[in-house]
């Protein structure tokens, strides 16, 4: 009887287990196929598209090529190519004559090299918005480039050069779109501003911040801000079946530190057990060997993957839709590549190492510069505590060159005007690609505008493939002419779409799979 009882109990437990497994699988599948929204179909008439004929395309190509050839390089906050920045001011005035001569556009130079355009709309009762881009680029030498980085060479449908992607394509595309709109007699209903900063690559303190101060002195508030940032990515997110548009609703914080070690100097023939270089090298090695904690799920990145779950192939779609269960697995997978690892944690990058003057002299001082990009769930103080504990050597002195916390997360719900205008424009220009909020892992001038609006979006209106990611700030930066046309079409439609006084509404196509 006891054996029968045991068999009965075991059978009941097995039945309960199988029932539990079945219920779990059912719950996972239900959430997978109901979590994300179907394809969006926008209501109402959309903006007029930019029709670019041969003349317009030639004009656009030449405009970008000329811009790339002006080496507006920023080396540091103190060292920029100011001659080139002054030349760029004359260049855009010559290339976009209607923008500079329009009766309803006011242009002013801010802080000598940045530009602020005020485009007056017909309805002054509508709150204005702002579009940002930047003129300066990071340094580049000829070594390793297919074409010299400031040649603006056009080859096989691509324009090569430093700034082709970051960010002169947006500068030229935006001004060209406005030029084309003016050419057909267009005046916007809603006022807007264009801000072109000259020092974004080295902080924006003298450019974008001065533009903000100017607007604040006028009492300006903005309904939304659009700056460079994320893009339409194709093949970048492993497992996603088609291109998707990522819109940065926040960006990571930053800390730049100098680590310094001072030890007695001496002759290389009588070296001590530890030198300043050795102590510092061990410290930075500890930082590299002990990365910051994985914060996946504690910031907005989880929402991004959940909203993208519909685009993943099976079984990844089930995992992404049910991160409450699978986030430990997903977060470990994301750690395996630099681009996705940057989403899940604060990153550590040793960027400069200086020490020594002569081969037979043990140096007194060694210094390293380290840049950290902060995950949205961490603060500057929290990261500094981790750094000190990881180095754990009082001989290594820390000095903060600059730091700021991650930016607030901008609203991206169906009631937010700026996000919905942006989403509608992206859908129109990029053939209905899914639009999801994301984290901008770099920093932009838009971070200085947080007191003017709570709706800041970071999106570069072109498509990137995996091989394109390394070109930004890297070798052989380039943009295709087709992508450049998309940039113009995006701004051309965005300006018109923003004339609405209502949040765009959309239907859901429930038959789209």
Image: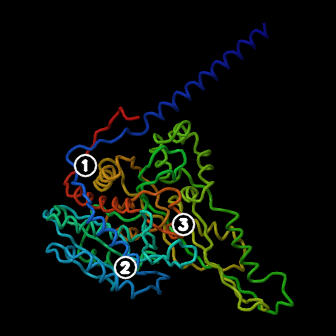
Above or below, 405 against 71 in this view is above
Q: Identify the secondary structure beneath mark 3.
A: strand
Q: Mark 3 points at which residue?
A: 373
Residue lying at 53% horizontally and 59% vertically, measured from the top left: 467
Q: Name the residue under label 2.
A: 207
Position of residue 495 measured from the top left corner of the image (x, y, whole percent): 24, 61
| 1 or 3: tag closer to the N-terminus | 3
Specify the quadrant of the image occupied by residue 111.
bottom left
Residue lying at 55% horizontally and 40% vertically, measured from the top left: 316
Q: Nearer the viewer, residue 238 or 229?
A: 238
- Seen in the image, is 187 located left or right of residue 167? left
Above or below, 315 against 238 in this view is above
Position of residue 379 measured from the top left corner of the image (x, y, whole percent): 53, 65
Above or below, 39 against 71 in this view is above
Q: Identify the secondary structure beneath mark 2.
A: loop
- Seen in the image, is 489 located left or right of residue 242? left
Specify the quadrant of the image occupied by residue 327.
top right
Question: Can you tell which mark lies on residue 222?
Answer: none
Q: Are marks 3 and 2 in contact (CB under 8 Å)?
A: no
Position of residue 436 measured from the top left corner of the image (x, y, whole percent): 41, 50
Q: Mark 1 points at which residue?
A: 504
Inter-mark Cα distance, 1 to 2: 33 Å
Residue lying at 54% horizontally and 68% vertically, measured from the top left: 380
């Amino acid at each position: 009887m006891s054996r029968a009882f045991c068999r009965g109990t075991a059978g009941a437990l097995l039945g309960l287990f199988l029932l539990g497994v079945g219920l779990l699988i059912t719950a996972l599948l239900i959430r997978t196929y109901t979590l994300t929204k179907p394809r969006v179909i926008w209501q109402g008439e959309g903006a007029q598209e930019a029709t670019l004929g041969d003349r317009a395309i030639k004009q656009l190509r030449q405009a970008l090529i000329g811009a790339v050839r002006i080496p507006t390089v920023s080396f540091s906050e103190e060292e920029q190519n100011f001659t080139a920045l002054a030349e760029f001011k004359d260049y855009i005035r010559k290339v976009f004559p209607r923008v500079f001569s329009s009766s309803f556009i006011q242009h002013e130079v801010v802080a000598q090299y940045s530009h602020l355009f005020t485009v007056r709309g017909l309805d002054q009762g509508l709150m204005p918005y702002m579009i940002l881009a930047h003129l300066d680029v990071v340094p580049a030498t000829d070594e390793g480039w297919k074409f010299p980085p400031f040649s603006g060479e056009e080859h096989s449908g691509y324009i090569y050069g430093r700034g082709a992607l970051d960010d002169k394509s947006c500068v030229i595309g935006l001004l060209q779109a406005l030029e084309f709109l003016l050419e057909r007699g267009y005046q916007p209903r809603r006022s807007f501003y264009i801000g072109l900063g000259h020092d974004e690559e080295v902080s924006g303190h003298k450019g974008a911040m001065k533009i903000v101060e100017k607007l604040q002195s006028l009492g300006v508030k903005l309904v939304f801000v659009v700056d460079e940032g994320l893009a339409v990515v194709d093949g970048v997110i492993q497992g996603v079946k088609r291109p998707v548009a990522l819109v940065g609703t926040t960006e990571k914080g930053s800390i730049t530190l100098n680590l310094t070690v001072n030890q007695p100097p001496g002759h290389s023939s009588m070296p001590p057990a530890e030198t300043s270089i050795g102590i510092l090298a061990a410290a930075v090695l500890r930082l590299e060997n002990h990365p910051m904690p994985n914060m996946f799920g504690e910031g907005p990145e989880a929402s991004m993957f959940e909203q993208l779950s519909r685009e993943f192939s099976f079984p990844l779609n089930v995992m992404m839709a049910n991160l409450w269960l699978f986030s430990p697995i997903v977060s470990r997978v994301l750690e395996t590549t630099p681009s996705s690892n940057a989403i899940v944690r604060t990153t550590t990058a040793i960027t400069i190492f200086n020490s020594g003057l002569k081969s037979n002299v043990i140096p007194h001082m060694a210094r390293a510069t380290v840049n950290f990009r902060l995950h949205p769930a961490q603060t500057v103080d929290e990261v500094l505590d981790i750094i000190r504990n990881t180095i754990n050597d009082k001989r290594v002195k820390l000095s903060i060159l600059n730091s700021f916390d991650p930016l607030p997360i901008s609203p991206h719900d169906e009631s937010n005007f700026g996000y919905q205008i942006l989403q509608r424009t992206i859908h129109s220009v990029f053939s209905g690609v899914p639009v999801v909020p994301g984290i901008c892992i770099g920093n932009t001038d838009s971070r200085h505008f947080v007191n003017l609006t709570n709706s800041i979006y970071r999106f570069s209106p072109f498509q990137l493939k995996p091989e394109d990611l390394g070109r930004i700030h890297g070798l052989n930066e380039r943009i295709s002419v087709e992508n450049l046309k998309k940039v113009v079409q995006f701004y051309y439609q965005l300006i018109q779409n923003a004339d609405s006084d209502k949040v765009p509404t959309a239907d859901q196509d429930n038959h789209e799979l």
